[in-house]
Amino acid sequence: MSEFDKQLKAFTVLHRATTAVHEATKKDIQQSDLNLTEFAVMELLYHKGDQPIQVIGKKVLIASSSITYVVDKLEKKNLIKRVACPTDRRVTFVSLTDEGSAMIESIFPTHEKKIAAIFDVLSEEELLALTDYLKRVGHHANTL
């Protein structure tokens, strides 16, 4: 098998594994009437607290043009709210509402269990190695 064939196989396996993990987690999240992007925003706010709207897109890996749409949808569902920054009028923070906090607190444990179940096939050493390998590939891909 040539070097390129090995690389292509690694790419295919990575892509299929990513798709499988994505699909496995998507099923649980959709039961809560959220899509994956909405869930990612809610999860970020749940774990990191209030965030500037400009930062959310970068942290959950969505285009800045889409973040306003996602925030609008979550705001209409009364799950988040916009809060003006008292020191800089250019900055708007996003925070969970009480209803949003209650929702993410009720659905996150199921998500956490699903992630644990997905990765329980690996030992702790294998999980650390996988994480390291994927970071290296990701960082290198970003430089190309």
Image: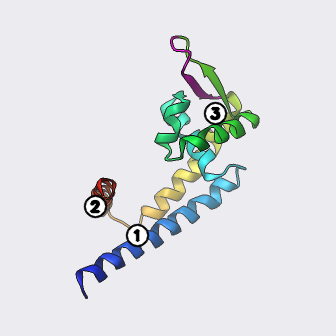
Which residue type does callout 3 highlight? Ser
Q: Residues within 10 Å of mark 2 (few under 14, many from 20)?
A: few
Which residue is label 1 attached to? 14
- Specify whether residue 90 is painted magenta: yes
Q: Residue at x 52, y 28 (%)?
A: 52
* Distance from the alpha carbon under mark 3 to that under mark 1: 34 Å
Q: Secondary structure at mark 2?
A: helix
Q: Examine the rendered structure and indicate whether residue 132 appears above or below residue 54.
A: below
Q: Residue at x 54, y 45 (%)?
A: 63
Q: Which mark is residue 141?
A: none
Give 51 or 104, whichever is nearer the viewer.
51
Q: Secondary structure at mark 3?
A: helix
Magenta extent: 87-96
- Mark 1 and mark 2 in contact? Answer it, CB < 8 Å: no
Q: Which mark is residue 133?
A: 2
Is residue 33 toward the left or the right of residue 142 in the image? Answer: right
Mark 3 and mark 2 lie on one chain; the one further toward the N terminus is 3
Q: Position of residue 15 (x, y in %)?
A: 45, 70
Foreground mark, 3 or 2, reads 2
Q: Position of residue 26 (x, y in %)?
A: 61, 59
* Distance from the alpha carbon under mark 1 to that under mark 2: 11 Å
Is residue 112 toward the left or the right of residue 138 in the image? Answer: right
Is residue 9 toward the left or the right of residue 88 in the image? Answer: left
Mark 1 and mark 2 lie on one chain; the one further toward the N terminus is 1
Q: Examine the rendered structure and indicate whether residue 26 appears above or below residue 78.
A: below
Q: Position of residue 91 (x, y in %)?
A: 54, 22
Give 140 or 79, whichever is nearer the viewer.
140
Is residue 129 toward the left or the right of residue 72 in the image? Answer: left
* Distance from the alpha carbon under mark 3 to that under mark 2: 34 Å
